[in-house]
Amino acid sequence: MTSQTSPMDAMILERPEERKERADKVDFKMVTFSLGGKEYGIDIMNVKEIARANRFTYVPNSAPFVRGVYNLRGDIISIIDLRIMFHLPVEKREEDALESLLILRVEDHVFGVIVDSIDKVVGVSRTSIQPPHPIFGDINVKYIQGIVENAGKLYIILDIAKIFSPKAEKEEHPSRYEPPSGASIPTEISAARTGTARPAAADAEMTAGFVKEGLFSFRHFAVTSVNETWFRARYKEWERLRAGTDLQLHEEADADAFLEGFLSPYSGTLWGADYMDAVASFLPDSDLRSFNVWNPGCGKGYETWSLACTLRRKYPQSRVKIWANDSDLLAISMAPNMVFDASAVPEPYRAFLVKGMNGWTFDQAVRDSIFFEFHDVLNSNSLPPVDLIVCRDMISFLAPEEQKRVLADFQDKLKGTGLLILGTHETAATGAWRPVGSGAVSAFAKA
Amino acid sequence: MRVEYINPFVESAFNVLKEVLQGEVKRGELYLKSTSIPVMGVAAIVGLAGDVEGRVLFDMDKPTALRVASVMNGEELKTMDELVKATITELANMITAQAVTKLHELGFKFDLTPPAIFTGENMEVSDQDVEALIVPMETAQGKLEINVAIRERG
């Protein structure tokens, strides 16, 4: 094996003495390269060639780690930036600088990956490859085939087939949450206007139907399986409260009275320490490098700031990014520049406050983690896959068919291990979700 | 679209229009739109690149375009000729450039592409996966719509 030299070996030959030393037991060769200052290797059998190139043709709407396509002597191949894929730092380069490319072949697919620099070909014995350890390196352990030491350097061997095979995406996100506690959820969204649909139904059912209609027309609150449980309980209470008087809702004030108690704790204000801790307890414990959050219906932004601080406490090392949207322009316009009265802010937030010109604001790191956007959740968006969606008490105020659409969109945007947090009295009511929360935190994982 | 981007566009559109048209300018209610948007007849487009990607579209009907160009050139223009097109293109450029300057002061880096102008009947514009912010502007010369679609680069 060592006497043969492929074109690539000729280019970057090992030092002869090294080769001699292992000549008898070398049965695994890898191309080594560096990524974010660490040494990695890829099985040479997967490497077609090595190239240097730049000016890749940008492909719109592709994943961030796809740098574009490249014409390799007539074949169009996609170029993937491994550093972006694994969230490693990317060195700034001159505009025209050539990138180091490894052209890989996995089964029938040929594509190029960009790395910081390509080193050489190293031959080792298969038996010296050790299994990866979870704490090792910056790359998810699933993608690592093993670790091997050579000439005093430790190389992480990447499992190219796992990274780039189409099935990898599914295996990448095993469920981290406990199975559902057996609670069954209704699967169908019931029509909001049962009262009118079934004139022959009992009086009580009729009145409940009218109340539902009132809620929708006065406050655009649609009773569906998302909030049916709460509605039933509240309706019983309502009957007791209004005993002997008119149960129906005649004006907005009536609707507001009925909806009293629906909103989740700390709506329109910063979350208290108890709720922060409760939310944090449902988040995965591992220290992820980046943590993406979607916070639709953030309103004036109190919820988003609370969330940002909760995540900063939970994941001090991670790069947290929160996309917070609301379709109320007035409310969200104020959100980025919110000023607080330090004495009124709960204790856990104080560490993140700095004194600005007009009062206390959150520090730059917290501010930088949030994108406040004027966005309607019913329109399309360009969010990347997210780890967490916090959408408290917003879905209930959409029309029934819109609720379905938004929940489907959540399903689409959430990573396999991701978590959805709805309002305390809301539930994600299709078979696609399973409840994992408790108490005031209504949390769901993908089923 | 990020909240921080909205005001610079609204303000610069307001300021530039007021200055070049020398008259009252009224801002309509802002709203969001997804999928395809009909274009009124004359559309100048300026692309944005940098930290973000997207485009700004200035949309008006033909008579409005002629009236706006007439005021800006100080002479009566009656047909959609090169001068009118160049004038509308320049207007789009002025507004976008001023907005981008303001955004730069706020720490956002945008680059502009040279503006292009489209004219025709029954046109519409679609942006995949981006919703557009519509800023309607009422002037003495007619109604203009500024249609901003920007998204962060992933």
Image (cartoon, coloured by chain):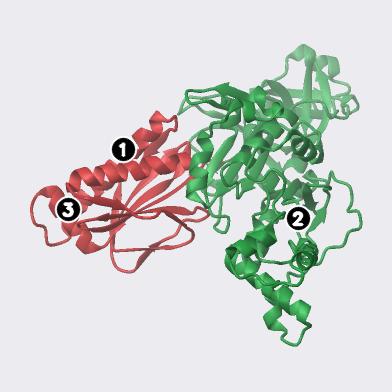
Q: Amino acid type of disc 1? A: Gln
Secondary structure of residue under mark 3: helix
- Residue that badge 3 annotates: B69
Which of the 4 image quadrants contains residue A36? Answer: top right
Q: Which mark is residue B98?
A: 1
Secondary structure of residue under mark 2: loop
Contact? badges 1 and 2 (CB < 8 Å): no
- Residue that badge 2 annotates: A425
The answer to whether residue A65 is seen in the rendering is no
Same subunit, tags 1 and 2: no
Q: Colour of chain A?
A: green
Of badges 1 and 2, the one in the foreground is 2
Rendered residue at 78%/26% (across/down):
A156
Q: The red chain is which one?
A: B
Q: In this view, does A39 lie above or below A251?
A: above
The answer for which chain carries disc 3 is B
Rendered residue at 73%/73% (across/down):
A208
